[in-house]
Image (cartoon, helix red, strand yellow):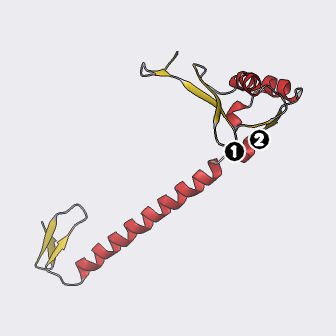
Amino acid sequence: MIKTINGGFNYNFQSGVDDKYGMMAIHYITQSPSDKKELLVTVKELNEILHKENYTIVVDYGYWHIKSLNEIYNSPTTIVIPDKASTSRTKEKKTMKRKKIIKIIKQTKKKNLENINSLNTGKTTHICPNGSILTRQNNNMQN
């Protein structure tokens, strides 16, 4: 079993699903922390269940292991796997995070502007962002 930092255990579920009917052809649980070395095991299991080697398998980038890919490349099985560049979303994530931060800054500026404007309108009381109520006395705001 794979021990985690907090003392728990991890398992890795593998499966092979038929694309026509969506039925699970194989499934098993492994203690391998990544999918890299599970590709050959999965393909061998599929070969036994399907009684053939001439089929196409589609996997994600987590299965990228050069030795496994070479072995499958030299077999009748066709593999479809994306390259790392097409699976990377770091630029997209950074853009989303930046947009969220800008939105928060704009909202904060707008609130602060509203608070400043309410101070200058001659109102007798003002509610601060922290919830305190200020009362105008002699043209000064006091708590």
- Between the residue at mark 1 and the residue at mark 2, the CA separation in whole angstroms equals 7 Å
* Quarter of the figure with residue 110: bottom left
* Quarter of the figure with residue 130: bottom left
Looking at the rendered structure, the secondary structure element under dot 2 is loop
Q: Describe residue 27's horizontal placement relative to residue 64 as left or right.
A: left
Report the residue marked by disc 2.
83
Looking at the rendered structure, the secondary structure element under dot 1 is helix
* Amino acid type, label 1: Thr
Q: Nearer the viewer, residue 138 or 53?
A: 53
- Tell me where residue 107 appears, x and y as whole percent: 40, 67
Q: Nearer the viewer, residue 9 or 57?
A: 57
**Of the numbered discs in the image, which one, if any, rests on residue 87?**
1
Q: Residue at x 13, y 80 (%)?
A: 124
Q: Residue at x 71, y 37 (%)?
A: 59
Q: Describe residue 14's horizontal placement relative to residue 102 as left or right.
A: right
Q: Nearer the viewer, residue 118 or 93?
A: 93
Whether tag 1 and tag 2 are in contact, CB under 8 A, the answer is yes
- Determine whether 45 is above or below 100 in the image: above
The number of discs equals: 2
Q: Describe residue 95's horizontal placement relative to residue 83 as left or right.
A: left
Q: Residue at x 81, y 28 (%)?
A: 69
- Determine whether 97 is above or below 87 in the image: below
Farthest residue, direction left: 137
Farthest residue, direction bottom: 122
**Of the numbered discs in the image, which one, if any, rests on residue 108?**
none
- Determine whether 111 is above or below 93 in the image: below
* Amino acid type, label 2: Asp
- Tell me where residue 24 appears, x and y as whole percent: 63, 34
- Tell me where residue 108 appears, x and y as whole percent: 38, 65
